[in-house]
Amino acid sequence: MINNDNFSIINNGEKMAENIEIPVSVGPMNEGERVRGPDMQVELAGPKSYGFELVKVVDKASDEISIVGKDLDGMEEGSRTPFAVIVNVGGESLEEDLEGVLERRIHEIFNYIEGVMHLNQRDSVWIRISKDTYSKGLRLKHIGKVIQDIYKAEFPFIKHVDVKLITEPDIVKEELEKARKIYTDRDEKTKNLHEEDVDTFYGCIMCQSFAPTHVCVITPDKPALCGGINYFDARAAAKIDPEGPIFEVPKGECLDEKLGIYEGVNNIVQEKSGGAIKEFALHSVMDIPSTSCGCFEAITFYIPEVDGFGIVDRSYKGETPIGVPFSALAGQCSGGKQVEGFCGMSIAYMKSPKFFQADGGWNRVVWLPKELKEKVNDAIPEELKDKIATEEDISNITELQEFLKNKNHPVVENWGSMEEEVGMDEEEVEGEESYDEENEISVSTMSLHSGFGGLPSNVKIILKNATIKAEKIIIMKETEKPKKK
Ligand code: SF4
Ligand SMILES: [Zn+2]
């Protein structure tokens, strides 16, 4: 895959021709490798620093690799540095709409390099270089060369590739602002196009390498959950590389407009998930939601105590009101699973007019991290802005209930009827009084669902010979839940 043609390298302004040998292995066998803190030589960008990656289609590229700022050997062991990757690609049939999809491949390319770990995308990238790989001689020019060679090898329509790797903090900062503007412009493009205007959606299975049943379905109203691929990006990718991981999905008949269930989507999802997923609704968290791989930008999660949704994004490091952080929720719904009540999504989807419309959309959102709330501020309906709590307003469910009640959030209206909605019949069962006197129940074995009481999703609790005491115990007869069409 890697060839050693002569190419031009510019190191901090000094131009030279070099025959480059990559000192470590490069290929898919290195994907999934983790570089833990103690094994790390340096960290580039990441949550404690800043950086981005950007691919741009240009008229003319000249196969140059340039490094602006310190190389890896100029960085202190264990330190972190701002970092930017800018790749300019040139070739006759290239369209601007391909930028998002090509950019998404940077993640894979970095992870192909032995001892290099790459997480996330766009302006949330996070890269680590291992001590071992560093001592074998890996430097930034090698990374640049790998990027250049893989783009040319995998996309024959790309004729020339310039790679610029920046570690100079001020320049990264300056370029980051420009990159953010480009990301926003890309996301805005689909604003005036909707599902009802098109006959074809697009699917992506790039993440099946680690989430085998995961299929992303990308529509004008729903960008991919990784946040890197919107409808136009996917359309351009399927056109230029029909055998690639992004493909057309004929929409077919719309089976439920509100939920976003389409015959064509169901057929493709069944086929591409190997039959594991039978159908999914594009716009619901509660009813056959889309599958989630693991690279979602944010997760929407149901909070039964308030009958509303919390949303947490990857950059939020604190706990959600249910007592667990993003990472624990991610464990609950990643790997290609379809988990009712949890759904991975892109931040751009929060700006969609169909944003979880089947569940009530913004009217059901009760909690967001403050930073995310600011980021999507324009998308939040004016009357709800001060009714959605953040970590600054509340820190647990009881406080959240209180907050929502005080603000008269629309979910409060449903609280009275919640029991009926989940299929409970209020009719009291004979014998209730005897329990009411004691207010306790004895059970020989009882298991609590994962995530109960805010515990991590991989912890299961089984109670043996337990006595449950409560202020009040209400016993209700379960009735059949009304079926949705
Ligand atoms: S998250 Fe979806 S769209 Fe993004 S790379 Fe993975 S499969 Fe493709
Ligand atoms: Zn993914």
Image (cartoon, grey):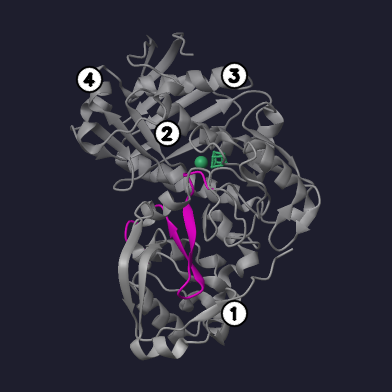
Q: Is residue 310 magenta?
A: yes
Q: Are marks 4 and 1 in contact (CB under 8 Å)?
A: no
Disc 2 under 8 Å from ligand 1? The reply is no
Residue 59, compared with residue 369, is above or below; it is above
* SS category of the residue bearing label 4: helix
Report the residue at 38% width, 64% height from top: 446
- Which of the two labelled residues, at mark 3 and mark 2, occupies the earlier sequence position? 2
Report the residue at 74% width, 61% height from top: 257
Q: Quadrant of residue 66?
A: top left
Residue type at mark 2 is Val
Callout 1 environment at 10 Å: few (<14), some (14 to 19), or many (20+)? some
- Which of the two labelled residues, at mark 3 and mark 1, occupies the earlier sequence position? 3
* SS category of the residue bearing label 2: strand
- Which of the two labelled residues, at mark 1 and mark 2, occupies the earlier sequence position? 2
Residue 364 percent across, percent down from the top left: 55, 72
Q: Tell me the residue that label 1 is attached to.
A: 420
Q: Is residue 359 visible?
A: yes
Q: Tell me the residue that label 4 is attached to.
A: 135
Q: Quadrant of residue 425?
A: bottom right
Residue type at mark 3 is Lys
Residue 358 percent across, percent down from the top left: 65, 65
Residue type at mark 4 is Ser
Q: Which stretch appears magenta?
A: 292-320
Q: Tell me the residue that label 2 is attached to.
A: 85
